[in-house]
Image (cartoon, helix red, strand yellow):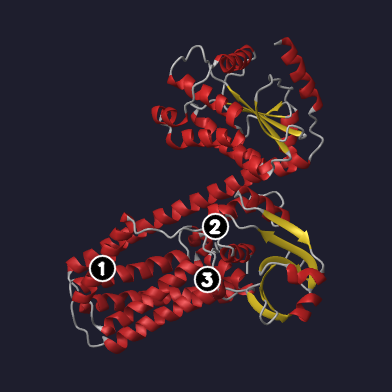
Amino acid sequence: MTIYRLLFLYLKKMNIHLDQKEFAFQLESHPDFPSLAALSDTLNLFQVANAALHVHASEIDSLPTNFITKLKDTKEDTLSYVETHDTNHEFIVYQNSKKTIFSKEAFVKKWKGIVFLVAENTALQKKLSSFTFIHAVTLVCFLSFLALVKQHLLITEQFLFLLFPAIGFFLSVIALKHLFKIEHTIFNSFCHGATSENCSEIVHSTHWKFLDFINFSDVSITFFSFQIVLFFIFGFTTNFDIFFQLQSIMLLAAVPILILSLYYQKFIAKKWCTICISIGGIILGELLYVFVFHQNNTSEITFFEYTVSVFSLGIIVLLWYFIKDSYVKINRLETAERKAITFKKNYLLFKNTLISNPITVVPQTALIFGNEKAKLTLEFVTNPFCGFCEAPYFMLKNILERHENDVCIRLFFNFDIHKNRNEASQLVQQLVYTYQTYGVKAFMKALDAWYEEKNLAHWLQKHSHTFDSFEVDRMLQKHRSYFVDHQLTFTPLLIINGYKFPEMYSITDLNYFIEEIIHDHTIQLAESRKAINRVDTII
């Protein structure tokens, strides 16, 4: 059982649902993958609270009913998912594709004292999906297909043959599971252990020159696809005799390729591929079927029927060429992107880039969130009408929720209050007044509402208050003048302990590093605080 299946089994029990593909991508791009630290950081990125704890064996009974742990007699980095049953005091352990049941005494003997837990997150709990337009169209198409099948293809003998290419197509997809990025226990069981390496080597081998252009997996997937397409073409025209005549020709032509494949495995690669042998067995089964049930078939294939078959084959070959080429390019891009993100997530690189910038000084602000005495200060310069500021705001809000005692966030509106004497200026004034009068929660609720609807007239109708805006306008204009004078006019702008966030990163990349920044006390704040005091004295 891979770390992904084990983790998502655990998350499913906790009713937490994440995008598995995106999670795997982010986890594999972590510099410390596949460690427990990488797992924890990636869950934090997806806003799933988690913790690794040391728990004594005497405290096992106080653990939740589901958790992840490391047990003795396993590899150092091998994790296990555990479910407990209070009624019979049994521990069900999922590890390496196996499910084992232990008594409490046996489980304690394997106990290493490390537990990994996640907390429930109602925002990530799966909602029942409603019946959408896509579902309706899919249902109509499926029912229409069944109606056609019932009308034209209701002979059991014909459907029996269709099982052969269907299974062959399935095996061909399994042979290309690395291309399609398919990971599942059922698929992996076809090529397990050392055999998996053999299958991959045979399927992707280029020992012979012509295999650079077309390999055995290409031949098998196009062959079985061609059979399935012809089955329905001639089936819907009630012309099965012609179909089986064509199959006898195709299957006899496939025999030399089977012999070539076996020769290649035996004498060139000197390894056997179970999938390739299974596909060969299916083709021989089809050949036996045709000669047993259709040996007396004397139908003649017309030029038109040959043309339809060749045209169908050509379309399938072209489609497969473009599909495979697209998947190869996508996989290359994903690999390159994963390497780039792994490089980008390197904390030491980020830190060195950050502190290589000169100290950036900003004035004081009344909009302060979190712990004012925290060693980590994040200064965020934004504008409610800046489209690029929305995502960083919600990211900082999430950081504040998770690390309220460890972070101080100082917020600035870079907005020209004198130039924009209209409803736009009223929004900014009302936000500042809401903070000063009603506090942090009311401010965030109002700003969240603005980003949700972005309807200025409607927002002002719901969130406006009557007040003297002189002091608010004075603060806003003071900030605006300072930012213009110091060429800090672009938003969003993020400053970490006096250092401007590096331009080579997106501000939302802060999520990757926030845990390490909080615990890194070498990024000093003293100089920037002194500078801020000097600026306020000057202003």
Can residue 35 be seen in this snapshot? no
Which residue lies at the image location 82% right of the left edge and 67% below the top edge? Answer: 56
Instruction: State which quarter of the image contains the C terminus.
Output: top right
Q: Say which mark, if any, is on residue 513.
A: none
Q: Say which mark, if any, is on residue 20.
A: 2
Which residue lies at the image location 61% right of the left edge and 65% below the top edge? Answer: 10
Q: Earlier in the sequence, mark 2 or mark 1?
A: 2
Which residue is disc 1 drawn over?
Answer: 143
Q: Is residue 28 left or right of residue 276?
A: right
- Type of amino acid under label 1: Leu
- Nearer to me, 502 or 414: 414
- Type of amino acid under label 2: Gln
Label 2, residues with CA under 10 Å away: few <14, some 14-19, many ≥20:
few
Mark 2 residue element: helix
Which label lies toward us, 1 or 3? 1
- Type of amino acid under label 3: Phe
Tell me residue 445's x, y (percent).
Answer: 53, 37
Which residue is disc 3 drawn over?
Answer: 187
Tell me residue 168's x, y (percent).
Answer: 42, 74
- Nearer to me, 417 or 28: 417
